[in-house]
Image: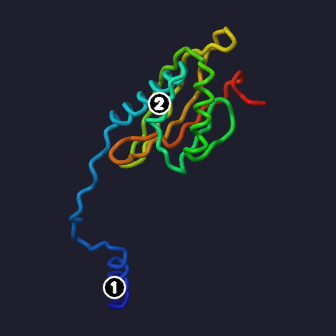
Amino acid sequence: MRIKYLAVVLCVLSIGITPGVASAEEPPAPVSADSVSKATEAFYAALNQMFVGELAPMEAVWSHKDDVVYVGPSGGMHTGWANILPIWKEQADLKLGGEIKIKNMHVINGEDIAVVTNYEVGENTINGEVQKVELRATNIFRKEDGEWKMIGHHTDLLPWLVKK
């Protein structure tokens, strides 16, 4: 019986749990969903600026690391900021005009990573014709130097943007 008891105690101690002793570490403070919502709103403000050819706001909201990913409405999957920036530039050069708004935003946030799902609703102009937009989107943010930066953006396809 003593051997079984000793085995259990050693097992518990080996995984760092001491019976009857509370952890001295404080859990991290919960991250405000509001701060993640603000980062999301900044992304969509940058998107709308991109529609008139202004790329700088989009560059500011994204992480510039090699692990970021973009799966946008024109198709394809692009990884790494060096590969994503030219895609945003190409879209900015289209000067699609219009505006996209967030609808039904849902935030899942952690200490350093947050996931936001929502609809992107609005319109753009293609060849002088107004095109309605309603896409599902998933946005992933990572806290870098105390700021939420976009590290992933994934949407449905827009037939009039898909490259053949």
| Residue pictured at 55% horizontal, 31% vertical | 137
* Viewer-proximal residue among 24 and 137: 137
Residue that label 2 marks: 56
Q: Position of residue 106 (x, y in %)?
A: 45, 32
Quadrant of the snapshot with the C terminus: top right
Of badges 1 and 2, nearer the viewer stands: 2
| Residue pictured at 53% horizontal, 18% vertical | 52
* Viewer-proximal residue among 89 and 20: 89
Q: Secondary structure at mark 2?
A: helix
Task: Estimate the spatial distance between the alpha carbons at disc 1 and disc 2, rounded to whole Å.
Answer: 64 Å
| Residue pictured at 54% horizontal, 46% vertical | 68
Q: Position of residue 66 (x, y in %)?
A: 54, 51
> Which numbered disc flags the more N-terminal residue, 1 or 2?
1
Outermost residue, right direction? 164
Q: Position of residue 84 (x, y in %)?
A: 59, 40
Residue that label 1 marks: 5
Q: Is residue 108 left or right of residue 27?
A: right
**How crowded is the residue under tag 1: few (<14 C-alpha within 10 Å), some, or many (20+)?**
few
* Viewer-proximal residue among 45 and 117: 45
Q: Secondary structure at mark 1?
A: helix
Quadrant of the snapshot with the N terminus: bottom left
Q: Position of residue 41 (x, y in %)?
A: 41, 27
Amino acid at circle 2: Ala
- Tell me which corner region of the image, top left, top right, bottom left or bottom right, holds residue 95: top right
| Residue pictured at 33% horizontal, 85% vertical | 5
Q: Are marks 1 and 2 in contact (CB under 8 Å)?
A: no
Amino acid at circle 1: Tyr
Q: Is residue 62 left or right of residue 133?
A: left
